Structure formats: C-alpha cells, structure tokens
Image (cartoon, rainbow, N blue to C red):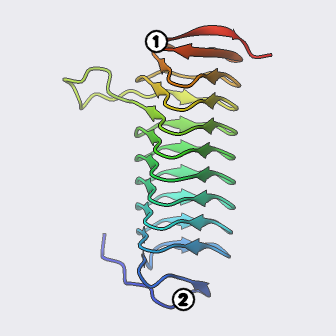
Amino acid sequence: MRLPKKINLMKEGIPMIESSIISPEATLGQNVSIGRFCIIEDGVNIGANVCIGDYSLVLSGSSIGDESNIGTYNKIGRNVVIGKYCCFTSYCEIRDSCILGNYVSMGSRCTLSAGTTVEDDVTIKYNFVYTDTPVLSKNEVKKVGILKKGSRYGANVTIMPGVTIGKNSEIGAWSQVRHDVPDNEVWYGNPAKFYRKVT
C-alpha cells in the first residue's frame, strides 16, 4: 500500500480531522464522520452516514454499510464486509475476511477471528471472543463457524473453534461454548449446556 496523504481540510466536501489519514483510494459516502487519529486504507468503501470514532483503523479492501457506527479504538481487518446499521463500541477487533450482516451490535473488547460470518440482527455484549485455533501447537490451522441470525451473547462469552450458534439462540454470560447450538435454544455455563428453549 502506498502511504496515503494526510487530510487536513476536506475530502469531497466531508470534514476531516487533521490528525487522521484517509487513503485517496478510499470511497466515502455522504455525511461520513471520521474522528481523530484514524487510518482508512486503500480500497475501503464507507457508506452514507457512517460515524467512525477516534483511533480506529480500517484496513484495505473493507466496506462499512450505511448508517453504521464504529466507535473508538476499533480495528477492522482486510477485506471485511460490515452491513448496514451496525454498531460497535470500543476496542473491538474484526479480523480479516469477516462478513457481518445488517443490525449487528458489539459491546467493547470483542474479537472475531478471521473468516467469521455473523448474520443479521446479532447482539454481542462486551468481552466476547470467537476463537479459531483448535490445537494450540498448530497455530497455522484455523477453523471458524457462524453466528446465525438473531442470536444473542452475554458478557464474557467464548465461542470455541468451528462452533456454529443457531438462529435466535442465546448464550448466557461467562459461557464457553464447545459444541454447535441448535436454533431457538438458551445455553450457558463452562462448558455451556442446554438450559431451555427460547419462548
């Protein structure tokens, strides 16, 4: 990537903070707001009415859908797709090639491993981790699953490698999920186990 120039006045009529760096190869929609000390790399596509908070990083080839709010200190990896009306608070890391649907919300300090798919209407509270390394001595081997539409996650949840969470299911706080969860079920615990059907 060639080093983008520092923006200190306007880019296509959009006010920019002097301390942020926006690649001339990035595409910005109408009414985009970008905070202080942000870096937006080549090939990034930011939709209309998106707000990006201070100290955030959006790497090359990623896109952010209309009306999304990316809070402070967030890192969005390469070739990530984020849908419309998404909201992330602070210190979230969305690693390379993740795909997020519309209306996805994440609390602070959440991590999605590379290649994770998150469908529409998923709500994740803070300190969430989706892991991807089944055998720690083989760090080059990765495995991820899917967080399906309408699923919900309490604080401090860990999803183990390759696990898929079903539609409209709920994972309780402080849970470690080691097995696939079917649609419309509540699981919690360490390891997480079935509690009841969603009513």
Q: In this view, does 114 lie to the left or right of 168?
A: left
Quadrant of image for the N terminus: bottom left
The quarter of the rendered structure image containing the C terminus is top right
Q: Which residue appears farthest toward the left when viewing the image?
A: 137
Residue 102: x, y in percent? 68, 47
Q: Which of marks 1 and 2 is nearer the N terminus?
A: 2
| Residue plotted at (56% across, 58% down) | 70
Residue 20, image x, y percentages: 43, 77
- The residue at 54%/51% (across/down) is 81
Decide if residue 8 is in sight here: yes
Residue at 70%, 32% (x, y): give it: 150
Horizontal relation, residue 160 to residue 106: left or right? left
Three-letter residue code for mark 1: Pro
The CA span between labels 1 and 2 is 52 Å
Depth check: give the residue in front, 36 or 166: 36
135 left or right of 23 in image:
left
Q: Mark 1 points at which residue?
A: 191
Name of the residue lying farthest toward the right: 199
Q: Residue 10 carries which label?
A: 2
Image coordinates of residue 191 in percent, x first then y, are 46, 12
Closer to viewer: mark 1 or mark 2 = 1
* Mark 2: secondary structure: strand
Horizontal and vertical percent position of residue 168 = 71, 25
| Total count of labels | 2
Residue 181 appears in the rendering: no
Crowdedness of circle 1 by 10 Å Cα count: few (<14), some, many (20+)?
Answer: few
Q: Nearer the viewer, residue 90 or 16?
A: 90
Q: Residue 26 carries which label?
A: none
x 54%, y 22%: residue = 164
Type of amino acid at the residue the image marks with label 2: Met
Disc 2 residue crowd, few under 14, some 14–19, many 20+, Cα 10 Å: few
Q: What element carries label 1?
A: loop
